[in-house]
């Protein structure tokens, strides 16, 4: 007997933790459905989507590298914020049968910050390290929450173009990533009533990648340090932040947050998270 299913596509894809996350929630919710991974080569994206469009059991797919741009031309509707970000990470079939592409990275990134964002602040500033696909979603998300952004990349001109494209309304700043590598004696003013973030939105510090060079003298007092890297989960960036007394958010927060938003598109209900994500995090780190 056939069962409804969703999946994640990419190339490579075997490393994806999405099947574990969604499988855990499906089991907890008692939903008779599956979530799997499917390797799709670059040249097979159109064929894959045509086949899934015709499959009544298919509920949608998460999209990872290198397909977040390639899938867009084969969809019927590109929703916000995917249209502005310029990348789709979630595809689902609407009630009328059309295929919709959206991006859950932005709401997934914001989810662990929601209690802070619900407060009022005199000023909000975020230092974002990186200018890749994840950074695009984060820039869009934080600009929408009233942050002034300092975007740092190895190519400051690329950072400037990204800001002009995704956050044209604010007075944002583009700098060289190396600017944050050396200590500074900058005297920060009183941060009471302000919200400061320092976000590693790059793969630097990830297993197999070069280290991230960030000197925490550039972080304002009380700033929250957020690293989207998931391997290792406790990065040197987060360790240094904690050593300096700063609060931190790790990469599983965004990973789980974006998956939760996708789950609702696929299966028509929120995932069961009433008890928090401790059990799921234990499974992810096992």
Image (cartoon, rainbow, N blue to C red):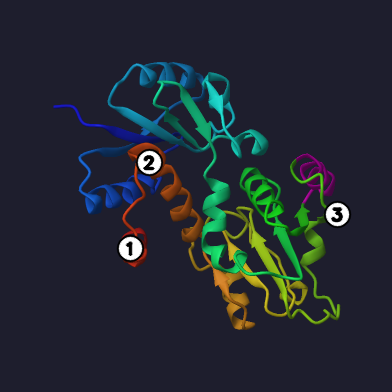
Marking on residue 274: 1
Circle 3 sits on which residue? 171
Name the front one of labels 3 and 2: 3
- Asked if residue 13 is positioned above or below residue 207 in the image, the reply reads above
Q: Secondary structure at mark 1?
A: loop
Q: Nearer the viewer, residue 284 or 193?
A: 193
Mark 1–mark 2 contact, CB under 8 Å?
A: no
Residue 134 percent across, percent down from the top left: 61, 47
Look at the image and tell me in which quarter the N terminus lies: top left
Q: Secondary structure at mark 3?
A: loop
Q: Is residue 163 magenta?
A: yes
Q: For residue 200, which quarter of the picture?
A: bottom right
Rate crowding at label 1 as few (under 14), some (14 to 19) or many (20 or more) other CA atoms within 10 Å.
few
Tell me where the magenta segment starts and ends, as one range. Answer: 154-165
Q: Nearer the viewer, residue 86 or 205?
A: 86
Apparent side of residue 271 relative to residue 241 in the rendered image (left or right): left
Rounded to the nearest whole Å, what is the CA distance between mark 1 and mark 3? Answer: 39 Å
Name the front one of labels 1 and 2: 1
Look at the image and tell me in which quarter the C terminus lies: bottom left
Rounded to the nearest whole Å, what is the CA distance between mark 1 and mark 2? Answer: 29 Å
Q: Secondary structure at mark 2?
A: loop
- Asked if residue 216 is positioned above or below residue 213 in the image, the reply reads below
Apparent side of residue 262 relative to residue 23 in the rendered image (left or right): right
Marking on residue 14: 2
- Asked if residue 245 is positioned above or below residue 183 in the image, the reply reads below
Q: Earlier in the sequence, mark 3 or mark 2?
A: 2
Apparent side of residue 18 relative to residue 204 in the rendered image (left or right): left
Q: Earlier in the sequence, mark 1 or mark 3?
A: 3
Marking on residue 53: none
Q: For residue 14, which quarter of the picture?
A: top left
């Amino acid at each position: 007997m056939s069962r409804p299913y969703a999946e994640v596509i990419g190339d490579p894809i075997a490393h994806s933790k999405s099947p574990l996350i969604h499988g855990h929630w499906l089991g907890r919710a008692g939903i008779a459905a599956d979530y799997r991974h499917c390797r799709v080569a670059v040249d097979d994206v159109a064929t894959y989507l045509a086949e899934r469009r015709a499959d009544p059991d298919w509920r949608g797919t998460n999209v990872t590298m290198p397909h977040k741009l390639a899938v867009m031309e084969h969809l019927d509707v590109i929703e916000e914020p995917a249209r502005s970000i310029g990348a789709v990470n979630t595809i689902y079939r609407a009630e009328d049968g059309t295929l919709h592409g959206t991006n859950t990275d932005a709401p997934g990134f914001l989810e662990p910050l929601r209690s802070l964002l619900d407060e009022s602040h005199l000023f909000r500033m975020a230092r974002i390290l990186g200018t890749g696909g994840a950074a695009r979603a984060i820039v869009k998300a934080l600009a929408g929450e009233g942050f002034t952004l300092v975007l740092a990349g190895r190519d400051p001109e690329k950072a400037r173009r990204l800001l002009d494209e995704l956050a044209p309304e604010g007075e944002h700043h583009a700098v060289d990533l190396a600017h944050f590598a050396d200590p500074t004696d900058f005297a920060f003013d009183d941060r009471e009533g302000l919200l400061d973030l320092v976000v590693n939105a790059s793969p630097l510090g990830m297993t197999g990648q070069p280290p991230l060079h960030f000197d925490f003298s550039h972080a304002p007092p009380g700033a929250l340090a957020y690293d989207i890297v998931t391997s290792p989960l406790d990065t040197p960036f987060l360790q240094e932040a904690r050593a300096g007394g700063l609060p931190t958010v790790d990469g599983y927060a965004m990973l789980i947050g974006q998956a939760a938003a996708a789950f609702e598109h696929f299966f028509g209900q929120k995932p069961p998270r009433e008890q928090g994500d401790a059990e799921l995090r234990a499974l992810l780190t096992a």
